[in-house]
Amino acid sequence: MSVRAVVKGVGHYLPDRIVENSEFEESLETSDEWIRSRSGIERRHLAAEGQTTSEMATAASQAALKDAGLEPDDLDAIIVATSTADLTFPSAATMVQHALGMTKGYAFDVQAVCAGFVFALSNANALIVSGQAKRVLVIGAETFSRIMDWTDRGTCVLFGDGAGALILEAENGDGTNADRGILSVDLNSDGSQRDILYVDGGVSTQSTGHLRMQGKEVFRHAVEKLAKTADTALEKIGLTGDDVDWIVPHQANLRIITKTAQKMGVPMERVVVTVQDHGNTSAASIPLALSVGKARGQISPGDLVVTEAIGGGLAWGAVVLRW
Ligand code: UT7
């Protein structure tokens, strides 16, 4: 028998304002056709003035709690994956804890940029498997619109804002791949690649900064590393792409998503794709896609789901779980 971290609920929040690709044609030398064909993105949601990451994270969490039929004080811990917290400190997670009215437990943030949700899931799994927590709320939430250089057509058309949340609960399993819950994790980072994707500001350099990206280079790493990390996570438990019901990838670029699925031998009918409607929401993209995928009726209990993501750091990884 082994303890598994099993999904009990999922939810998401997207800000009201939707920006279509064509809106960028007014201020930048770009086109709907270019954005659509190079990235698969058609529109994105952007936070309202003054709307914060923790507010969106709280809304997504309330939806996940409702889905799970749980109250905030049923939780032991909250982990928020974000690179765009409201304040330098306290963490977005403690702000969510307070906003939910949770009076016990503990909360902290994880920062692994676009791979943040995969890293947060791995942390939550470790807390549950080691017996330190029974129920953990794992959130990905971002306001990347705040770190865009709106004059840089190579980045600002690609990102969006939003939040997604998942509740994991300890359950006894048989220790086999038939168990529900998180079955395998693979995490990686390579700090030598800092300059291809970073923000040129921060607390100790005394500015907020803007996201800077060498798109082609990041693309090359993504295509090479994502299928590998997903296959490694599957191999660790003796599975392959053939066993996968759904890939729920980080939603950065439809061409990356397609190439990764191809390399894994998984047809696109078994990939949850939301990038056309959300753009790249960094750490929020996987929980958003899990929530939307469930709402669409794509992901059902018992399905084998693989999530994979890569982002600044570089940091990348994959989680295999049975829904
Ligand atoms: O979530 C974190 C991970 N991030 C990613 O995974 C993003 C990875 N990279 C990508 O998704 C793609 O590389 C992009 C979508 C960013 C770019 O696609 P690309 O096919 O690699 O294009 P490129 O950067 O090589 O640019 C091709 C051309 C360039 O013009 P020249 O030099 O060939 O004359 C760019 O200046 O397209 C130009 N360009 C644009 N044109 C119209 C760049 N951005 C735009 C734009 N509109 N918005």
Image: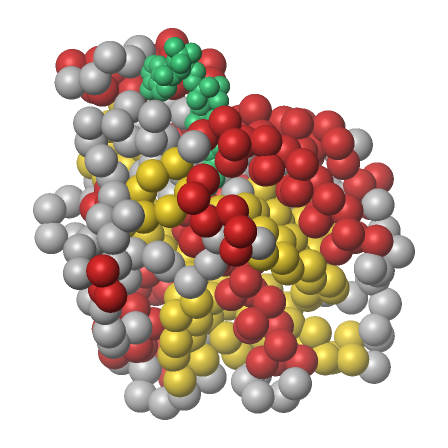
- Position of 282 with respect to 187 (left or right) is left
Q: Quadrant of the N terminus?
A: bottom right
The residue at 25%/31% (across/down) is: 18
User: Is 261 located above or below residue 284 in the figure?
Assistant: above
Q: Nearer the viewer, residue 274 or 319?
A: 319
Residue furthest toward the right? 238
The quadrant holding residue 121 is bottom right
Which color scheme does this rendered protein use? secondary structure
Is there any visible trace of residue 8 in the rendered image? no
Residue 172 x/y as whole percent: 74, 79
Is there any visible trace of residue 134 in the rendered image? yes
Residue 99 x/y as whole percent: 24, 73
The residue at 75%/55% (across/down) is: 233
Residue 112 x/y as whole percent: 47, 58
How many marks the image carries: the answer is 0
The residue at 45%/30% (across/down) is: 215
Q: Quadrant of the C terminus?
A: bottom right
User: Is 100 located above or below residue 116 in the figure?
Assistant: below
Residue 131 x/y as whole percent: 63, 88
The residue at 65%/85% (across/down) is: 130
Residue furthest toward the left? 49
Ligand 1 is found in the corner quadrant, namely top left
Q: Nearer the viewer, residue 35 or 307?
A: 35
